Image (spheres, grey):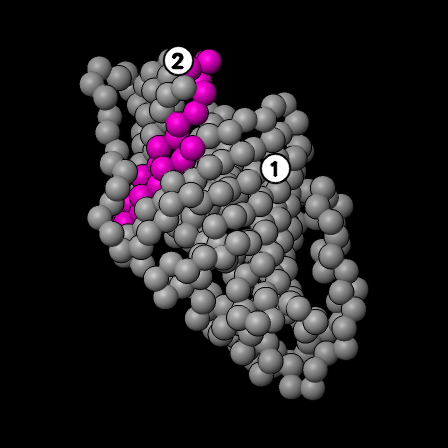
Amino acid sequence: MKYLKILLLITIAASCKTVKKVATIQEAIDKKDTTQTVVITETPKVDSAAIVRNIMEKVVTNNIQFKTFNAKIKVDYESAENSDSYTGYLSIAKDSLIYIRIRGSFLGISAEGLQVKITKDSVVLVKKVGEKYVQYRTIDYLKEATQIPFDFSTLQDLLIGNPVFMTNNIVSYRDGPTTLSVLMVGEIFKHLISLSNEDFKVVHSKLDDVDIQRNRTCAISFSNYQPMGTYQFATQRKIVVAEKSKLDINLDFKEFSLNEPLKYAFEIPKNYKRK
């Protein structure tokens, strides 16, 4: 299920407690990986707790709220083994359903190759080229396929463009000339998030394992923000995922809309065997 793993990887918010001390960062991410190490040196501000709290409140305010979401996405990816391009069709009913359809060149034929239906507790896959079948799995399949602790809500936020793996354990920050950078540490990831100084839009998010025995890292860049209702939506995203190997993914949202009827349905063709 190479195509599903790529899809989930690409598609694949909290209030702040009082911060007693904001420390100078010697190395924001002290890990060897395939993305650039971010080094920040900055003297903390005096009222650090209030500053950090205000920054994170801005992030929460910018989170996209919606009932439904539809999108058409051009997906380009490159791994150590190969590279390819696909078109993804996405419909989300918030906190309920995620429908994904993938079209591209499969076995030399331009066709729709994969459909996915995701709910809070299940994943249904329909493979439509080569060996055709339908597969029923629990929501834990997202974690198994990507080796990232995805649940429904995290995947939903990733697809809509909201920051993921947020925590209120903020250990340091830097107020730079164009961006605000905040380092937070959760149970699984260290998360360095960079926000635009002008409007607090997320411009970069970098996740690294807290567990030093792992080399997993993910860097997400957000750009070309466009109006979507009352929100700003990042229509271009670059994702770099690395552990034992590296995967580069570029997403270009060609169409996107909020709070309209679901555009892309999920169908299981007749006579598909169950696997």
Q: Write down the residue under mark 1.
A: 248
Q: Residue at x 50, y 73 (%)?
A: 58
State whether residue 106 is above or below residue 56.
Answer: above
Mark 1 residue crowding within 10 angstroms, few (<14) / some (14–19) / many (20+) = some
Q: Position of residue 109 (x, y in %)?
A: 42, 15
Write the start and end of the magenta stretch as one range.
87-109
> Helix or strand or loop: what does disc 2 sit on?
loop
Quadrant of the rendering where the C terminus is positioned: top left
Q: Position of residue 258 (x, y in %)?
A: 31, 55
Q: Position of residue 129 (x, y in %)?
A: 37, 17
Q: Earlier in the sequence, mark 2 or mark 1?
A: 2
Q: Position of residue 182 (x, y in %)?
A: 63, 67
Residue 103: in magenta span: yes
What mark, if any, has residue 130 been given in the picture?
A: 2
Q: Residue at x 38, y 58 (%)?
A: 228
- Mark 2 and mark 1: Cα distance apart in space: 26 Å
- The residue lying toward the viewer, choosing from 186 and 191, is 191
Res. 213 image quadrant:
top right
What mark, if any, has residue 173 been given in the picture?
A: none
